[in-house]
Image: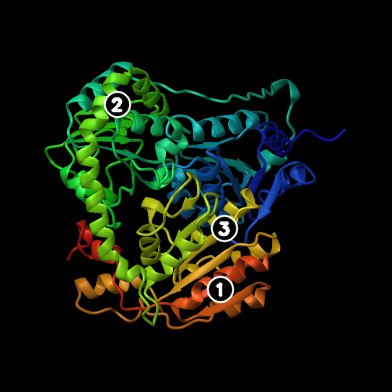
Amino acid sequence: MEKLTGARLAAEALLARGIKVIFTLSGGHITPIYQHLEKTDIQLFDTRHEQAAVFMAEAWGKLTRTAGTAMVTAGPGFTNALTGIGSARLSNTPVVLIAGAIGLETRDKLDLQDMCQAPVIEPMVKRAFVCMVPERIPEYIDMAYRTAVAGRPGPVYLELPVDVLNAEAKEEKITRPLTTVVSHPVDIKAANTVIDMIAKAEKPIIIGGSGIWYGNCADELKTFAEKTGMPVFTFAMGRGVLSDTHPLCFESSLAIRPGAALFASFHADLIIILGTRFSLFNIFGSIYNQSARIVQVDIFPEELGRNRSVDVPIVSDTGAFLHQCNALLKNDDCASLRKRFEPWIEELKKAAEESKSQAMPNWKSDNVPIHPMRLAWEINSFMDGEDDIVVADGGDTTTWIGMTRTMKTGGRYLDYGLFGCLAVGLPYANTAKLLNPDKRVLLLTGDGSIGFNFMEFETSIRKGLPIVVVINNDLGWGMIRHSQEIRVGHAITHGTYIGRVDYHRMVEALGGKGYLVEKPADIQPALEDAFASGKTCCINVLTDPTVISPGSVALANIGGYKA
């Protein structure tokens, strides 16, 4: 009979939880778990770098609303994973990072890859667990996954020393808990207060953030908007939960996006914030009308009132809160509200039209080198299906597509969010294709950001994940270059200039297909051919390196970045 070890218990616990994929890069300290996962229903999806493995797990968490799993070896494997964990922390994404470690018996003896790991990662995760007894591994795996998804989601760390994995376990000492936490707390009294506030407002707005997506309550948001006639803006993973094409949705809440967001922020008298935070993206709350009344709904109590006073702070699940509000709204009252807010809706429509008309010359520019907004426009026009998935990576590049992308469905757009971490693009896109093999997946990335995890092109090809990658090639680190021009008066060449690189040929050498595009009219034919090819493709688009994005301006002028 096979010996019952800690590693076998770990594998059995992961299988019992229904884990489908573990994103990983192999190493000696996790080989014992590999041995027991081989030929099971769990796919060990191997990447070319641990950072990419964690980014893939993060994308899995974002797209599925369940905990993504990454597994790395000790020491450098662990440290390579930290950047992805930092990203998951700021995006509130459920991820479980399982790491091997040197044996307990050889700690502080200068063993190979000797490192005290848990204290390093503890400030970056919801909880950091270290299991030191083989019989308790199933308990720790249960705790890790429960913690990652309970309340406000986030990353969790689980360390399993290699000698604990290899140690024999005694059956009589083992417990195998398997708990799934489903909780939707709601503040009923606060819902009544908010309905009263809406009844007194003239220019209200709703901002739906990631909490709407993770709370799986897009239908409740739509009902709430349609009953009251209030305009909706969406943000982060909330983008698309109410389609941008809906008459009450005014697209992204980001003020730099052409549309009505800036106007609404300045003029709204009631702002209902659902499942998102006061952060850099709304100038820490200061962008909103200072005399407006603020309602903030969040599952995490400590988030309420960060950076700005909130008139009605509400600790609730966003879906449960919206459901309660919808139940309180009476038909006659709703008809009166919708009529009263009609002039406000017309104001926002006019503001959106005027703002977009100013951006249109850049969206339709025929300039050569290509204006990056024209590139974003072409991608948005081509990827027009409700199920088409677009991933963004890069500083200015993410700004351009964020200013342009029309979202019709939730969970169909990914970028790096508040952590601002370049290198997420290829891992995110690979996960999106893995989860949606029959959907079109496109990554728009900068030429700087593509270099970080470039070998994940090889992962895409090796794993049969035909994604299309479009590189906005402005010859360097555009956002930093332009912010230096604003702050310093000139760009510092060393560190901001890369020059022309034929990335498309590098992808061809790996077995993919490459294209070089230098004229706007050639963008769409390249996209058509790339998706028709069924291969992993790289479209290298040479864009105007002199164009400055609003993101670059913000970087130069906001907070501590300003000289």
Residue 137 in the image: state x and y as whole percent: 64, 32
Q: CA distance from mark 1 to mark 2?
A: 49 Å
Dot 2, crowdedness within 10 Å: few (<14), some or many (≥20)?
A: many
Q: Amino acid at mark 2?
A: Ile
In the rendered picture of this protein, how many numbered marks are placed on residues? 3
The picture places residue 457, in percent across and down from the top left corner, at 61, 66
Q: How far apart are the alpha carbons under marks 2 and 3?
A: 37 Å
The first of marks 1 and 2 along the sequence is 2
Q: Quick one: 212 or 329, which is closer to the camera?
A: 329
**Residue 207 drawn above or below residue 151:** below
Mark 2 or 3: in front is: 3
Residue 378 left/right relative to 367? right
Q: Earlier in the sequence, mark 2 or mark 3?
A: 2
Which amino acid does the dot numbered 3 rest on?
A: Val
Q: Secondary structure at mark 1?
A: helix
Viewer-side residue, 10 vs 372: 372
Image quadrant containing the N terminus: top right
Residue 419 in the image: above or below residue 4: below
Q: Is residue 329 visible?
A: no
Where residue 25 sits, quadrant-wise, is bottom right
Residue that numbered label 2 is attached to: 314
- Please, what is the three-letter code of the amino acid marked with disc 1? Ala
Which residue is the site of mark 1? 526
Q: Say which element carries label 3.
A: strand
Q: Horizontal placement of 472 versus 229: left or right?
A: right
Residue 441: numbered disc:
3
Residue 521 image point, x, y percent = 47, 77
Percent of width and height locating residue 239: 41, 46
Mark 3, Cα crowd under 10 Å, few <14 / some 14-19 / many 20+, is many
